[in-house]
Amino acid sequence: MARTIATVQTPGRRRRSEAKKTAILDAAEALFLTEGYERTGVDAIAGHAQVSKRTVYDHFGDKATLFARVVERAHEAVVGVVRTALDEELTPGRELKDALTAFGQRVITQAVPSTAYVTFQRLTSQPWSTPRLPEVTRDLPERMLEERFAELAANGELRAADPGLAARHFSALTIGLALDELKAGQDTGAEAPTIAAVIADGVDAFLRAYR
């Protein structure tokens, strides 16, 4: 009877494998951004990553899965910034208006200008039919904010029977309006308003409804 010999991956082989995966993701991201999903082939990705086509398939299966992983990687980086802002700004005992204002400003000044956010927006707004992130993944930043608002409501700091709705209202009044103003300034060439003022006004409106 033939015996199956298990292949043990040494630390060195694991590092090389991870390096190849990163190279493939970097190459795929660059090509998806410049050429678009439809026009980018696995052959081109393998060439840019300096790996074989078989290696691309071994790690990611197919182009659709690879595209999804590129989008997920960018999304994960944005989520990390939002999570840090939540943990460092919406802290127990801090005056709620100050905390919400600081959080909104962190998202606009750190997450939105980041390379990861720009990459995510460009990849997910392509005109071609591209694989989409699952809704549960895409909405993670809002769900994290919902969880924090639920805690604030439980502590009596917010009047929010529906923390999810409160999170959507907060995002629309602050981050959403700030993004609209930034885009309007880019489209018209006009000087952008002070984002701090947009966030502050949004926080005031939110607290009038929820505190």
Image: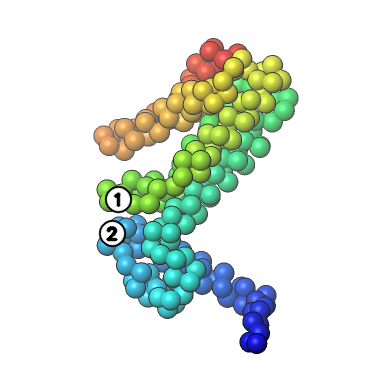
For image coordinates 34% across by 35% down, the residue present is 183
**Element type at mark 1:** loop
Q: CA distance from mark 1 to mark 2?
A: 8 Å
Q: Quadrant of the N terminus?
A: bottom right
Find disc 1 in the rendering and name its residue.
Answer: 129
Residue at the limit of the structure toward the bottom, as seen here: 1
For image coordinates 63% across by 87% down, the residue present is 2
Image location (x, y in percent) of residue 69 = 47, 57
Label number found at residue 38: 2
Q: Amino acid at mark 1?
A: Ser
- Marks counted in the figure total 2
Q: Would you call the spot at circle 1 few (<14 residues within 10 Å), some (14-19), or many (20 or more)?
A: few
Labelled pair 1, 2 in contact (Cβ < 8 Å): yes
Q: Amino acid at mark 2?
A: Glu
Corner quadrant of residue 98: top right
Corner quadrant of residue 153: top right
Residue at the limit of the structure toward the right, as seen here: 93
Q: Quadrant of the C terminus?
A: top right
Front-most of 149 and 190?
A: 149
The answer to whether residue 183 shows anywhere in this view is: yes
